Amino acid sequence: MIYQKPKGTKDIFGRETRRVEKANTLARAFFGQNGYEEIKTPTFEFTELFSRSIGENTDIVEKEMYSFKVDERSYVLRPEGTASVLRAVIENKISIPARFLYIGTMFRKEKPQKGRYREFLQLGIENLGKAEPFYDAETIYLAREFLKLVGAVEFRIEVNSIGCPKCRIQYKTELKSYLEPKMNRLCADCQRRFEKNFLRIFDCKKESCQPVYQAAPMITDRLCPECGEHYVKVKNFLNLMGIEYAENKRLVRGLDYYTKTVFEFKSRALGAQDTLLAGGRYDLLMKELGGGDVPCIGWAMGQERMLLTLPENLPKIEDPKVFFIAVMGERFAQELLRLRITVIDHGFICFMGNPEAPIKHQMKDADRFGADHVIIYGENEEKEHYYTVKNMKSGEQVQVLKDNLDKFLTAVV
């Protein structure tokens, strides 16, 4: 029997692993410079953390969580990062304001699509304790700058405001009056969502529902004075920061905890499901989870989807050269170890051959490992104080004096 990975999962290895780790390294450096501290939370949490924060009637809680029971307690594999970060802040009494970066694995039982998996890598940031519109714009600005840093191309930014609970009470009454005579034209999911999580109807992708929503009243046009002023100031700061964006009045988020500003970064490279990065403000969530009345904003991005938007030969994620060291005889083992340290100190990947194996076998191993260069050392090399270096791509072979090895390695590109 040949075992296969479960549907919606992915094996990551070789160049893909290096690309992911390079992106993570860039993220830690970039967000660290902007005051974000990395936080790691458990891969599984108690179920109620997400049913309370995300919302019991969201698709994630209703359909997509991987849950299990142990000793009558219900657990889930975490479907997103924000609730876990806030739980950790509350539980560990971390002082506010605070900024966090998280990088980790999430799990959702959704239909696999291009760049979307049931187990996926997610990178996100959370800015806790800041309510001012400037920080909404800064959060979007940092997302744009990071995507530019890693080389993402051809993405666009959409923004909207979905107001606060005060705005929504009156808006829901108006929307219900508009939709009631047209309800039979809506899909079953939209009819159910309207009763339980009415803003989610605008997230429907079914063509049959779209004509109804085209002429529907939009919450963005019916914001309370406070939310309206907040949204205007966010857009003003985006303009001052030189950020190109489009207003999308039908843009909502799939989680209940969002308020006011929401945004998405979209890329044509991803096809029909084109969202690359998404987030917004969630000023009510900390209190909902038992903490203080703390305003928050953040975003998250699936790294598999991010990689689909990056050029394959992005210089910042270039593979290092591979060296293989072949020495002829056990008595050269110490020279083998010294050479390895020198090669690695120059930033290259290094494989060591078995000193007891014939040189022919070692060269075959070098070829299997994809070596760019092989450094050969034996009796002749020892006697004449040089290394033989073979370029495995061109077949060219040169002799490099021992004292010139550092110079030679520095010149390798």
Image (tube, grey):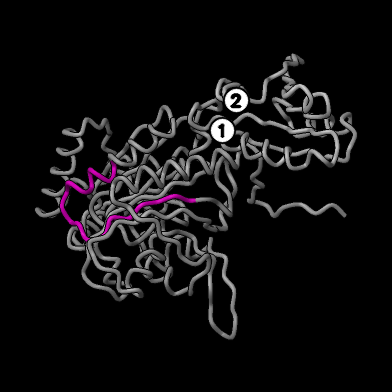
Q: Which residues are magenta?
A: 122-140
Position in image of residue 335 (x %, y %)? 73, 38
Label 1 secondary element: loop
Q: Residue 409: which numbered mark, if any?
A: 2
Position in image of residue 389 (x %, y %)? 72, 22
Position in image of residue 210 (x %, y %)? 39, 41
Please name the residue shown 84% across and 30% down the image.
364
User: Considering the image in quadrants, where does the C terminus appear?
Assistant: top right
Q: Which residue is mark 1?
A: 346
User: Considering the image in quadrants, where does the N terminus appear?
Assistant: bottom right
Position in image of residue 170 (x %, y %)? 18, 60
- The reply to whether callout 2 and callout 1 are in contact (CB within 8 Å) is yes
Q: CA distance from mark 2 to mark 1?
A: 7 Å
Please name the amino acid that badge 2 sits on: Leu
Number of marks drawn: 2
Q: Is residue 148 left or right of residue 65?
A: left
Q: Is residue 157 left or right of residue 153?
A: left
Q: Is residue 5 left or right of residue 299?
A: right
Q: Is residue 33 left or right of residue 357?
A: left
Please name the residue shown 73% across and 30% down the image.
370
Residue nearest the viewer, comparing 317 with 310: 317
Residue nearest the viewer, comparing 314 with 68: 314
Magenta stretch contains residue 135? yes
Residue 322 versus residue 259 in the image, above or below: above
Residue 157 versus residue 404 in the image, above or below: below
Q: Earlier in the sequence, mark 2 or mark 1?
A: 1
Please name the residue shown 25% across and 68% down the image.
95
